Image (tube, rainbow, N blue to C red):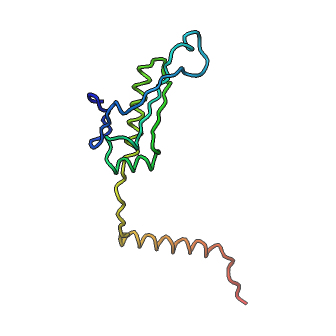
């Protein structure tokens, strides 16, 4: 995070006021303190309505995750630590959603690799031929 924005990558930064926060009690067993502290952090990011995203970023994220991205964290007993973890997981999810693989460029096999392939096929054929019953001379 830098200032009031969540830096996702070089081309994308999201204003923190676009994130919707909710804090609830964590589930599971616990003592007296467990029922009173709202330490579970839930952050929701509305992808479809975000002015911080470009058109292609919005389309890509909606295709991958839908119109909203929701992250819930109740790993630690600290609300502020869970909030930091939720921001980091949201950032990771956005990075994964916006990542584009480099286009694959088809290449031709080399002459040596073609020869190795043919030699391997010839060798395999000979191995199978040796398994046959020998021809009988009548």
In the shown orientation, is residue 48 left or right of residue 72? left
Instruction: Tell me which residue sits at (50%, 18%) in the image.
Output: 38
In the figure, residue 45 lies in which quadrant?
A: top left
Q: Residue at x 60, y 21 (%)?
A: 28
- Residue plotted at (35% across, 48% down): 57
Q: Is residue 2 left or right of residue 73?
A: left
Of all residues, the one furthest to the top in this rendering is: 32
Q: Quadrant of residue 91?
A: top left
Q: How many marks?
A: 0
The percent coordinates of residue 128 (x first, y second) are 61, 73
Viewer-side residue, 86 vs 130: 86
Q: Is residue 127 above or below residue 41?
A: below
Residue in front for this viewpoint, 39 or 29 = 39
* Lateral position of residue 115 relative to residue 34, left or right: left
Question: Residue 58's x, y, as percent?
Answer: 37, 47
Is residue 124 shown above or below 18?
below
Extreme residue toward the right, this view? 138
105 versus 133 height, above or below: above
Q: Give how far across and how far down residue 1 sits, in percent.
A: 30, 30
* Residue 117 percent across, percent down from the top left: 45, 70
């Amino acid at each position: 995070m830098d200032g009031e924005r969540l830096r996702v990558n070089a081309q994308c930064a999201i204003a923190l006021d676009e994130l919707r926060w909710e804090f609830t009690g964590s589930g599971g067993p616990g003592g007296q303190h467990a029922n009173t502290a709202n330490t579970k952090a839930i952050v929701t990011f509305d992808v479809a309505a975000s002015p911080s995203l470009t058109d292609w970023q919005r389309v890509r994220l909606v295709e991958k995750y839908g119109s909203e991205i929701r992250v819930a964290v109740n790993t630690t007993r600290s609300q502020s630590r869970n909030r930091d973890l939720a921001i980091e997981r949201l950032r990771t999810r956005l990075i994964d959603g916006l990542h584009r693989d480099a286009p694959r460029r088809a290449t031709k096999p080399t002459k040596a690799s073609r020869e190795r392939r043919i030699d391997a096929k010839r060798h395999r054929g000979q191995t199978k031929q040796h398994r046959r019953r020998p021809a009988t001379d009548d």
